Amino acid sequence: MKEGKNISKVIMAVAGPVIGLLYAVLFPFIGIAVLAKIVVQKTLVPSTIPGYASFGWRPSESYLAGRKKNK
């Protein structure tokens, strides 16, 4: 039973720096991908979506007791 605990500690001790190195190496690429996504959304999406999407969110209105029916 003790051998299993020791092996898992060794694996965690080795995996930690490896995962940290991967994070440090890939971080710039993640930033570039996020920046590219934002640029695409700001340039392409606003020109195509407004005709198709309608959002009816009105923060000043709340219908906690239900909506009043018109007579």
Image: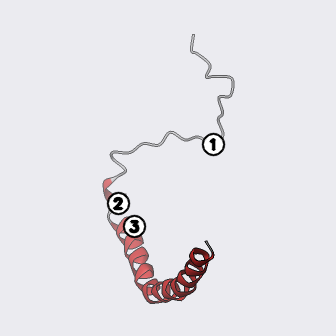
Q: Earlier in the sequence, mark 3 or mark 1?
A: 3
Quarter of the picture containing the C terminus is: top right
Residue under label 1, please give it. Answer: 59
Q: In x, y percent, where is residue 70? A: 57, 15
Residue under label 2, please give it. Answer: 45
**Tally of numbered tags:** 3
Q: How is the image coloured?
A: secondary structure
Q: Residue at x 68, y 28 (%)?
A: 64
Circle 1 residues within 10 Å: few <14, some 14–19, many ≥20: few
46 horizontally vs 5: left or right: left
Q: Is residue 1 above or below residue 18?
A: above
Assess whether mark 2 and mark 1 are in contact (beta carbons under 8 angstroms).
Answer: no
Q: Is residue 68 above or below residue 60?
A: above
Q: Earlier in the sequence, mark 1 or mark 2?
A: 2
Q: Residue furthest top?
A: 71
Q: Residue at x 56, y 77 (%)?
A: 8
Q: In x, y percent, where is residue 56? A: 50, 39
Q: In x, y percent, where is residue 40? A: 35, 69
45 or 25, nearer to the observer: 25
18 or 3, nearer to the observer: 3
Amino acid, disc 2:
Val
For the residues marked 3 and 1, what is the alpha-carbon distance in whole angstroms? Answer: 25 Å
Amino acid, disc 3:
Lys
Q: Residue at x 37, y 75 (%)?
A: 36
Residue under label 3, please give it. Answer: 42
For the residues marked 1 and 2, what is the alpha-carbon distance in whole angstroms? Answer: 24 Å
Amino acid, disc 1:
Pro
